[in-house]
Amino acid sequence: MANGENEALVEIEEVLQHLEAISFVAQRDAREALPALHGEDAQTRLLWLQAARDLFFHDREAGKAFMRATPELYARWPDVRRWTAQALVFTRWVNSWRALEGFLEQAGEVYAELGAEGEQAWYDIGMRWCERSVEDARAYFGTDYAKLTDGEGIAGIQALMAPAEMLAKEARLTLETYLPGALIARSVVGTPGLEPWARRGVDLMQTGRARGEAYFRLENAEGVRHLLDELPGYRPRRHSRFLQLLLLAWFDEEIPLADSDWRPGRGRPAMECDGRTIFMPAVLKDRDEAVVAALHTAGHLRYDTYARREIEALFAASDTEHPPLDEDQRITWRPLFAPYAERMFRFQVLFDLCEDLRVDARLCADVPGYATRLRRLLARAETPEGAPGIFFSFAREQYERLLRGDALDSRLQGLLAGEARLLDAFQAGQALFADEGFPDIAIEARSEAYLPGHGLNTGHAVYPRRTYAEIHDAPHADAYAEHRQTKEKQEGETPPQAPEQRQNDPDSDINVPPENTSGSGGRVGVGIPMPTKDVHTRGASREAGEGVIPYPEWDYREQRYLHEWAKVIERPVTEGKPKRAANILDDHAGALKRLRAALEMQRPARMAPLRRQPEGDELDIEATIDYVVDKRAGLSPEGRIYRRRAVQQRDTAVLLLADMSTSIMARHPSGEGKLIDRIRSGLILFSEALSSLGDAYAICGFASKYHDNVNYYVLKDFAEAGGAEVNARIAGVSGRLASRMGAAIRHSIRRFDAVDARHRLLLLLSDGRPADYDDGGDPRYLNEDTRMAMKEAVDAGVHPFCITLDPRGGQYLPSIFGPGHYTVLDRVDELPARLPEIYLRLRR
């Protein structure tokens, strides 16, 4: 036995000399790691050293990782032979050292938690993925095993990996694509919900691989939306009307509310503000937290956290150069935090705590019930673990003192004074920062350090504003002076509602006007291709660029309008094709001649009786009888008992809105020319017909690429005369992009403001259903928005009517326009003649 031990020691020295000849670093790492194995016999140490050498020869990084991880791994799991044998298996694959590194870092913890059998099962699952791809193995072994188990041991890992196995076989989806999103999805939908979530991703991958992979990585709206819909809790966006009226009641301001870009996996949800708009997360824990969060976030506006003079005072006191405003005219806080370098998040949390205390002290005094709600939240709150818990506990203690009326920490006491300013909170934050009892905190853990209903005050770049006193106490200024523009914009965006469209608000604190929640219908078939586009900043309104007109968009899933979501860019058309226009008129000369003859029948030539007039040529018998009956009954009726004849006049204006998406460039079914040829002819004949009739008319088109790029083309305006120039523009029309109808319809309603007409008709010419690249893969979404735009048109006194060239139009148009408000042209060739005829019929 002694001879075997001595021989092993000699071999160990020979291996070390061999390593030294090959690499000084390898020899050094081996000699540093060997003492950790002093409790093992020489044969075991030799076995370990030979494995280290083999791994180093296979991949230098793998060998170094093995040797450097040994001391810590051995301390947790003394079975050297077991984990050394497992490590050697990685030599079967090239470039597997990252996966090996992840294995070595966690194997000891897994063994301590799950035992030898559990560790072997964990290892075997990783090896199966290693056989598929070393990148998949790296993703598996590099993920914290505690996250993989989710408290359920190996069964939790197996349940998590089952959909991944299916996706790898059916869709060739890599584990590194699946795993990060799956961990978040499981925390939301639970283990049973993982398979439906994964199946939804498979369906999306059939429409485009990039789109499906973005779904699994939660990088597009589709993946995020699915999870948000499953989250339990209170949904602020569904109660935004209540919250906004609550803010109006207490702060005398109409503060816009919009959706934030929060999503599962991004820390604890909280409301945030950019100095103008309050951004709401998809869900908060309960109603108390939502109300406190809304009041607290608005309190920062009320007590001048974002006032220009207060922010400038911070820069002056910090001797920091004031940054220039960004392209959206906002100020960033970053230069104030830059001096704190890698400890900036520690200071940011402390500064926010101080400013929150200053604001909440005022709110508790000024807003009845706020302190009570805040007290309930603090009583239910659980202290987070680690560094966030230290900040959280300190903040809770100070708030409990505030609510009891006790003195605060001496460094914070000055924040309770009525004249305390943002600068005072900043200086108090600096005093706390000097206290080493507050640890450094990582950005990933930062959100956990805030109390319920509170969050980052200094995360967004902010629009600097005037102080509250300047806004509300200026001579001859009303309470809404600062926000009149926002108020008028919102009034214009929210259409009037019929009684049957209304519902009672779910909140009982304030009796608010009902809100439109109607929505039904569907879209059939598959529209245009939809490449991936991240829309996580949904509802976050920005300053519209020059020429950009924002409109709301109806989201039937949330039963609410998305504020300033669709952006319309009006583009006058100046170039045209006069020769093509002349050829179209020649080709349709016969149809135009018959059309003009029919128009003569529409001219106002006959005499029409006007009844119940105060004077006239003859008595109106029915009105006279009513007058006598009312007189004998002791009433005082008006003497409108005459009838007279007058020339019948029509007061009609029409806007023809043409869908100019890519699909109109398709070949004609006959094979002769394209669909666009018939559309150009129809629009030109329509223009010629209405020019002869004398009715006010406009011809426009639209095409879109995403919600923030809806192009609206003006071919002829109401005030412009028809003729050769207009025909030339129409002849130059071509198809492009997609068709976001709702935004185009809303802009058309606005254009009717330019004409004084009692009867207003909106003719929509389309060859298919609404569709756009960023409709989220929801076949119903833009249908519902178009349907709501139709209702808005009716409420505005505009009669909408759709003419479609899509033979399947009967499947989806009834749900959008309703019976009698659309027609399907089975033969595209009929369009040039039928278009003016349909108008004349509707005009009667």
Image (tube, grey):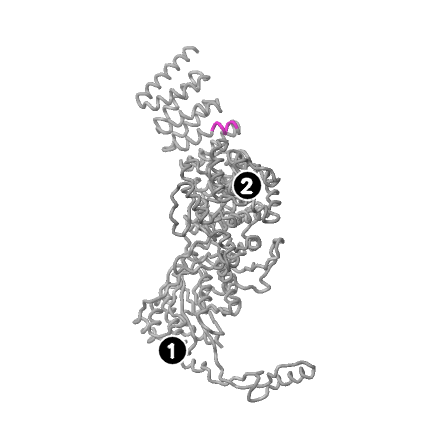
Question: Considering only vertical position in the picture, is 539 above or below 810?
Answer: above
- Compare residues 411 and 183 and report the one nearer the observer: 411
Task: Answer with the quarter of the image where residue 528 lies.
Answer: bottom left
Could one spot residue 230 in this view of the protein? no
Q: Which residue is mark 1?
A: 592
Crowdedness of circle 2 by 10 Å Cα count: few (<14), some, many (20+)?
many
Instruction: Classify mark 1: residues with Cα within 10 Å, few (<14), some (14-19) or many (20+).
Output: many
Q: Secondary structure at mark 1?
A: helix
Quick one: 145 or 653, which is closer to the camera? Answer: 653
The part of the chain drawn in magenta is 107-112
Query: Along the horizontal axis of the image, is 90 left or right of 557?
Result: left
Residue type beneath disc 2: Leu
Instruction: Give the number of the mark in front: 1 or 2.
Output: 2
Q: The residue tagged with tag 2: helix, strand or loop?
A: loop
Q: Nearer the viewer, residue 302 or 248?
A: 302
Q: Which residue is mark 2?
A: 451
**Residue 56 at x, y = what percent?**
36, 26
Residue sitting at 34 percent across and 17 percent down? 14
User: In the rendered image, is residue 367 in sight?
Assistant: yes
Q: In the picture shown, does residue 70 fall above or below 501?
A: above
